[in-house]
Image (cartoon, rainbow, N blue to C red):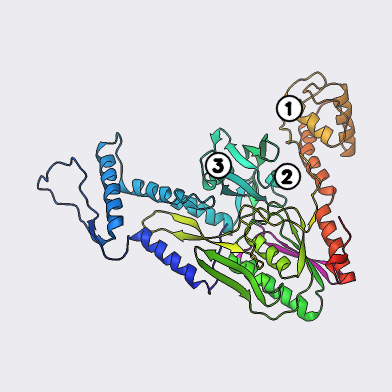
Amino acid sequence: MRFGTSPRSLGIMKVFLVVMLVIGLVLVPPGAMLAEGVIPPGTPPSTGETAPETESITVSKEQADLLRTFLDIQGLLMEYHTRELDYHELYLGAVRGMVDALGDRYSQHFTVEELENWEAALEGEYGGIGVTLDLVDARITVINTFPGSPAEDTGLKAGDVLLSVGEASMLGKLPQEAALLLRGEPGTTVEATFLRPSTGETMVFRFTRQLITPPTMDVKDLGDGMWLVSISSFTESVGLNLPIVLRSMRDSGALKGIVLDLRNNPGGLLDACVAIANELVPKGPVVELRRQELKEPIENPNDIVPVPVVVLVNGGSASASEILAGAIRDRGVGVLVGETTFGKGCVQSLVPAPLELGGVKFTIAEYFTPSGCGLNGRGLLPDFEVKPEVFQIPSPPTYKRPLRKGIVGLDVLAVQECLSFLGFNVGEPDGIFGPLTDAAMSRFAKAQGLQYSGTVTHELMGLLGPSCVQKVKDVGDGVMERGIEILKTKLATGNWSQLPAE
C-alpha cells in the first residue's frame, strides 16, 4: 500500500526532502567536523600504503558524538568479527534498524529486491494467491483478499496472521519476504499456516497459485438511477477515470444514488482517494492530515450537488477507504453498511534510498475525518451493522490414489469434509471410507452428471473443491442486498432517519 501526496502538501514534502538528504549524506547545521574514514581502535600504524579516501561533512555536536560511537563499533566489527564484512552490508542493516526504532507498526525498510517486488505487485500481473499483506504490530497480517483468488476461495480473511509458508517461519519477517515465498508459477501449489486472532484458530491452507491481476474498479447499473461502484484499490488510473465517469453520469441526470463497495479495499494513493471524494461530497473538508503540531486540511474545491451514497465496508476496508467513507458520512452524504473498518489512520510515503540501499516506507501523517475523528487502531463503526454469512470452506482434497470402500487416510478425510460441507451425509468425518461416504459420493457424482462405479477418480475428486467454493458464491451477497435496500429507502423517503430499524 502506498499513498501519494497532494500538491498542496508543502509542509509534508519538506519531510521527504529532509529524509532523502539524511539517507544520502548527513546534512545539519554547522558543528563538529567528522571524517568518514575514522580509524577503528586497535588498528596498527600506517605501513606507508595509500590512505583510504576520506570526505569531511558537517554535523551537529550531538550527532558527532553518536556517529563517532557508531563508527567505532563499525570498526570493531570489521576488524574482529569471525567473518569478512563489507560496509554496504552493515549500512543496509543500520538503515533497517533505524526504521525499526520508530516503533511504527506500518513503517518498514525494503531492500532493492523487496522494493522491486512490492512495486511489481502494485502495477502488474504475477503468479500468486491474491492477497494483500502488511505489517501490523510486528506480525504479517492479511489486509484483504482479491475477488475470485485462491486466497478468497479458501476462506482467508482480513486480520488473519501469517505464521509460516511451507517450513519457513514468518515470525519476525517482513511482508516482502512472505510475498517471495507465496508467489510462483501459476498452477503450482504452496502451503501456508495462519492464525485467526478472533477465534484463536490455527489454519493450514494449500493454495494453487493463479495469475493475479490486482483489481481496481467496476461500475454497474442497478436501475432507477442507482449505480454500484466497486473500488478494490485507489490506483492512479482509478483516480483519473472514476471522477470522469461520475461527472458524466451526474451531468446527464442518470445518477440518483450510489452503492459504493469498499469492502476489502486496503487503500492506495491519497490523491486518487481525494479526487473521487471531490465528486461525492459537497464543497469543503475531505480529510485533515496531522504531523506533530502541524495540521493540513484537504478540501473539495468543487461546488457540486451530491447524491446519496451507501458505503459498504468491512474489516478489510483500510486507509484510503476509511478516508473516503469517513468523508461521505461526516459530510452528511451517506451511511456505512457492513462491519467495522480496519483502522489504519495513517498516511505513508515511499522514499527510494541511493547507494543500493533500497527504500523506506514510513508514516508521514495521521489523518482525521472532517468531524475530527482519528481512526488509527479503531476504525469506523457502521451505521447499519450487517455481517455476511460465514463459511469455513474445507481445503480441496489432493488426488493421490483411487479411493473406495475400506480405504483409510487423510485424503479420505478431506473428501468427507467436502461432501459434508456440500450437504451430503457422511456421518462424522473420520478418514474411513465406509458405506455412508460411498453413498454420498454416488449422489455427488450424479449431481455432476457423472457415473460412479464405487471408485473416486481423479476427475471426481477434482470437482469437490470448486463445488464447495460455488456453494458459497450461490448464497448471495447479503451485505450488498441490504445496502441496495437502504439506498432505495433513502431515495423514496428523502431521509436517512426513516430507514427501518435493524
Q: CA distance from mark 3 to mark 1?
A: 25 Å
Question: Can residue 184 be seen in the rendering of this structure?
Answer: no
Q: Which residues are magenta?
A: 215-235
Give the image location of residue 273, x and y in percent: 63, 67
Location of mark 1 (residue): 411
- Most common secondary structure along the magenta stretch: strand
Dot 3: within a 10 Å radius of its alpha carbon, few (fewer than 14), some, or many (20 or more) residues?
some
Give the image location of residue 177, x and y in percent: 52, 44
- Which callout, 3 or 1, points at the residue further toward the start of the chain? 3
Tell me the quarter of the picture where residue 239 sits: bottom right
Q: At x 75% / y 57%, what residue is drawn?
A: 382
Location of mark 2 (residue): 153
Q: CA distance from mark 3 to mark 2?
A: 19 Å
- Which callout, 2 or 1, points at the residue further toward the start of the chain? 2
Mark 3 element type: helix
Q: Nearer the viewer, mark 2 or mark 1?
A: 2
Q: At x 30% / y 36%, what residue is drawn?
A: 83
Location of mark 3 (residue): 181
Mark 1 element type: helix
Dot 2: within a 10 Å radius of its alpha carbon, few (fewer than 14), some, or many (20 or more) residues?
many
Q: Any magenta on residue 58?
A: no
Q: Which mark is on residue 18?
A: none
**In the rendered view, does 92 fall on the left or right side of 394?**
left
